[in-house]
Image (cartoon, rainbow, N blue to C red):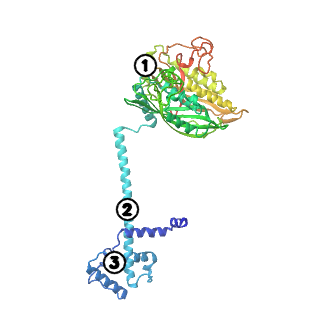
Amino acid sequence: MKNKHLKFIHLSLASWLKILIICFIAAFSFHPTEAFARAGGGHSYRGGSSHRSHSSSRSRSHSRSHSRSHKKGSKDSADGPDLKTIYAVVFDGASDGRSDVLGDAATDETAAAATIFFYKAVFVFFAIITLIVALLVLLVISLVIYALIKRILYGPPVPERVLNQRTHRIYLKTLKEADAHFSEPLFYDFIQLLFVRTLRALGDEEKLKAVTPYIKPEVLETIKSALLADSQGRLKDVVIGSFAIKNATANPEQIEVTTKLEADYTLLAEGEEKRYYLDATLILAKKAGVLSKGPNEITAPGCPNCGATSGIKADGTCAYCGSPVISGEHQWVVTYFNHYKELIDLVPGSEHVAEVGTNLPTVLDPDLEAKLAGLAERHPGFDRARLEERVKEAFLTIQEAWSSQRWELARPFETDAIFDVHRFWIDNYKRVNRRSVCENVNISQIELTKVDDDYYYEAVTYRIHASMLDYVLDRDGNVTSGSKTTPRAFTEYWTFIRTKDFSEKAYNSHECPNCGAEIKLNQAGKCEYCGTVVTSGNFDWVLSRIEQDESYVG
């Protein structure tokens, strides 16, 4: 069977042309007596007295048959050559005098009939091609006219980045209108901490009790099966790379948010470690009218009503206070999870990733000037120059902490969520005896792109243009990626936050703003002397988020 198919596919060009012509002839319901002229003149082959029959017996027999057919009035009888005959003439050379197929007397007339039908088939073929081309031209013209009318009515097409910025603003407006206490920085912290805690607790039922009030049981099972598969292992070194709101809706019943995050994690199973990249979509929902909790409550594990970490009952109520928790009556609940994952290299710094989006235009918030004026009005002592000095100091200090692998240097400038990310990567480089180096750091420009505020926080976003020598060294001092000689130019969007009731006061970044002692903070951002949380945004601007050019939407 296979050989037959191959033979059919590899027919010669001449064979395909023969098949095409026969198809056209069949499609025209071949009636030669109504269409053909006789050989040697312009008279109709269907003829009465003017027809002069040939002398051969085959011709006379054919003429008599033809005459009887007309007397009966039948249109279907063949008073001329049939398909088989014409095929023989066209393809077997009957017109060249091969009398083994046709009689000598009929040869000329049949050849003429076949020739005319051949021309007719060719004509129809080209007519169809011409019609198709004409339709395509009309389609193109219609699309051009439609595009011109659309441009006149609606203006030029909106760039994708601008469109993304507009939709993001719509989502935030929807959430703030439905929840007066909604805070974008707090929401990001809540999602990231919840996701990290959940993944770290997989495989440990006792630890999972702290997060079960925030995840539907069936969704939690989906996460388990997706990330643990059939192994009895556990996940560690979970770090969030990016996070974004993709949709937000609100109705009288509930508020729903679709989010997307990218993360890395390590699966430890049967004594073997594997590193994975994860692209996850989560949908969260809560009852309409439920207000977002404040900074000290929203990120706390356990029951959102009483704070207990005893888990939930089968009916979805807190095992300690009996309050319904997974119904969204107190806090956001994850109602959907979908993902894509792939295996990646366990060793960091093996590959130098090229910068993307450095030359893209800066994304400016349309309300930037009005929001900046509002910030200055709320804080009469607001000093933009001091703010920008704080931004530059934070940027340079964090690069130094990264290069020297001294995470404590960066702690006073970062919120918990982003500090956890940076600390992970520093520790990961240490684990494999490598060091990511940033030398000759130069800030060429900083641009204020956005000013925002919500119920709890104020936020500013700067696009930082910088360059540096960026490379990775192994334990022997060899460069594994990057370059010691060629500077790497890049830009990033850094968002800083502080609390809404912040009082304008100049603080020394090297001293605790509460007790004045030399700044020494633990991993929780607390002063080692007085226990004050310095990184809460109560005392100065702290880094909340870093976004790359290609993904920033404003």
Which image quadrant is residue 231 in?
A: top right
Q: Nearer the viewer, residue 105 or 64?
A: 64
Image coordinates of residue 507 in percent, x first then y, are 56, 14
Q: Amino acid at mark 2?
A: Ile
Say which mark, if any, is on residue 455.
none
Q: Secondary structure at mark 2?
A: helix
Q: Nearer the viewer, mark 3 or mark 2?
A: 3
Q: Secondary structure at mark 3?
A: loop
The answer to whether 314 appears left or right of 420 in the picture is left
Q: Nearer the viewer, residue 119 or 46?
A: 46
Q: Hey, what amino acid is under mark 1?
A: Gly
Amino acid type, mark 3: Ala
- The residue positioned 60% from the left and 24% from the top of the image is 398
Visible residue check, residue 389: no
Residue that label 2 marks: 128
Comes first in the chain, label 1 or label 3 = 3
Indicate the secondary structure of the residue bearing disc 1.
helix
The spot of residue 339 in percent (x, y) is 52, 38
Residue with the most extreme top position: 515
Residue wearing tag 1: 374
What's the CA distance linking mark 1 and mark 3? 95 Å
Residue 77's quadrant in the figure?
A: bottom left
The crowding category of the residue bearing disc 1, from other C-alpha atoms within 10 Å (few below 14, some 14 to 19, many at least 20), is: some
CA gap, disc 3 and disc 2:
28 Å
Residues marked 1 and 3 touching at CB (< 8 Å):
no
Q: Nearer the viewer, residue 1 or 145?
A: 1
Residue 15 placement (x, y as % from top left): 48, 69
The percent position of residue 123, horizontal first and vertical second, equals 37, 67
Pointer 3 residue: 78
Up-down: is 29 above or below 202? below
